[in-house]
Amino acid sequence: MRPKLLLVLLPLLMAARASAVDPFYLSLLRDGQHAFDRKDYAEAARDLRLACFGMLDEPQPLTDCLARLALAQDRADNVEGFRQTFQRLVELEERFKAYSQGTVAPELRAALEQRLAARVPAATLATAPAFRPAAAAKPAAGSKPAAAIPSSPSTSPSARPPAPTAPPEPVKAVAAPADPEAITEAELKKLNQARRSLAEQRPANELKEAFQTAREVADAHPGFREAQHLAAEGAYRLSRWSDAATYFRRGGDPGEDEPERLFYMAVALFESGDSAGAVAVLKRALPNLKRTPYVDTYSRKILGQ
C-alpha cells in the first residue's frame, strides 16, 4: 500500500512556513519524497539534503526535512550520514525544541524512532530526552519500519540493537606517562575532565566536547596509550565507529583486564568493516565481560551466529 506520508506531512510543512521557505526547496522536498516512494534512496537523500539546506533558518520545517533525510540515509545504508543527521536533530531540539514541540507527524516520528533504536546506541539516545523513547523501540530482526514509510525487511549488518544504557564504571584518573615531558599538567587535567564526562550520562554537546578534548591530546601525543583509548571511548559514545577504531588501533590492545574497552573496540572494528578483527577482540572480551541482552545480541552479530 502506497504510504500517505506526503499527504500527511507536506501540507503541515507548507501551511505552517510556506512563505518562509523558497519554493525551489519545497520542490526538492517533494522530489526527495517521490524518490523515496519509488525506493531510489540515494536520490532521495541527495534531494532531501539540498531541501534541508534551504530551511536552515526555519527550525520546524528543517526538523521535518531532516527526519525524512535520516530515513532515506538509513535505507541507503549510509550509517555515518544517518547519525550525523540525528546529531543535527538533537541540536535543533536543544536550541528550539523543534522535535518535541514541532509538527513532526506521528507516522514519521514512529518510523524515525524505530530506526534510531537500530542505528544509535541507547547511551547516546539517553543524552537527548526527546529521543529517549526510541531506546525502547527495539525492532526484531527483519522487522519493518513504521507503516507510513515504504520498506522491506532489513538484513543490513548495521541494523543492530542499541548500546548499553550506561557507560562502564569510571576507572582511576589518567596518570602521566613515564616521560614527564610527554604531556603537560593542563593536558592531563583535560583528559581527566573528558573521562568524567564520558563516564556519565551527558547531553550530546557535552559528549562531543569531551571527545574533542580527548582527541586533541591523543593527536598531540600519539604514543600516550591512555589518551588514545579515551578518545576511542569518546568516539564510541558518539557512534563514530571509524574514529573509534582508529584510536583503538593507535592505542593498542586494552587487555583482558578491561573487557568493556575490548568490547567497545570489537564493536568499532565490526561497524567500520573489520569483521575478522572484531571477532578476535570480542572472543577475548567475553570471558570477563558482564553479559547483557545487548552484549549477547551484538556478540551473535559479530560472531555470525
Image: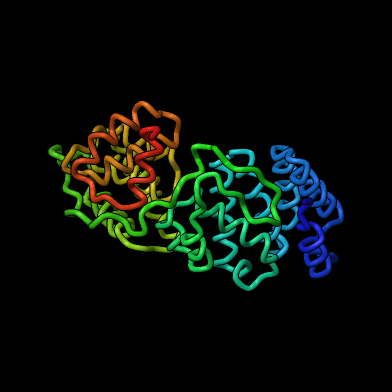
Looking at the image, residue 133 lies above or below residue 194: below
Q: Residue at x 73, y 40 (%)?
A: 39
Residues 181 and 268: in front is 268
Query: Disc count in the image?
Result: 0
Residues 111 and 212: in front is 111
Q: Residue at x 39, y 51 (%)?
A: 163
Residues 28 and 57: in front is 28
Looking at the image, residue 10 lies above or below residue 303: below
Give the x, y percent position of residue 246.
38, 34
Q: Residue at x 54, y 41 (%)?
A: 79
Q: Picture quarter containing residue 173?
A: bottom left
Give the x, y percent position of residue 289.
23, 46
Q: Picture quarter containing residue 180?
A: top left
Residues 140 and 221: in front is 140
Give the x, y percent position of residue 81.
58, 43
Q: Residue at x 56, y 58 (%)?
A: 113
Give the x, y percent position of residue 106.
67, 66
Q: Picture quarter containing residue 305?
A: top left
Residue lying furthest left: 178
Looking at the image, residue 45 lies above or below residue 3: above
Residue lying furthest bottom: 101
Instruction: Please indicate whether residue 10 sits to the left or right of residue 63 in the image.
Output: right
Instruction: Please indicate whether residue 248 sits to the left or right of residue 116 in the image.
Output: left
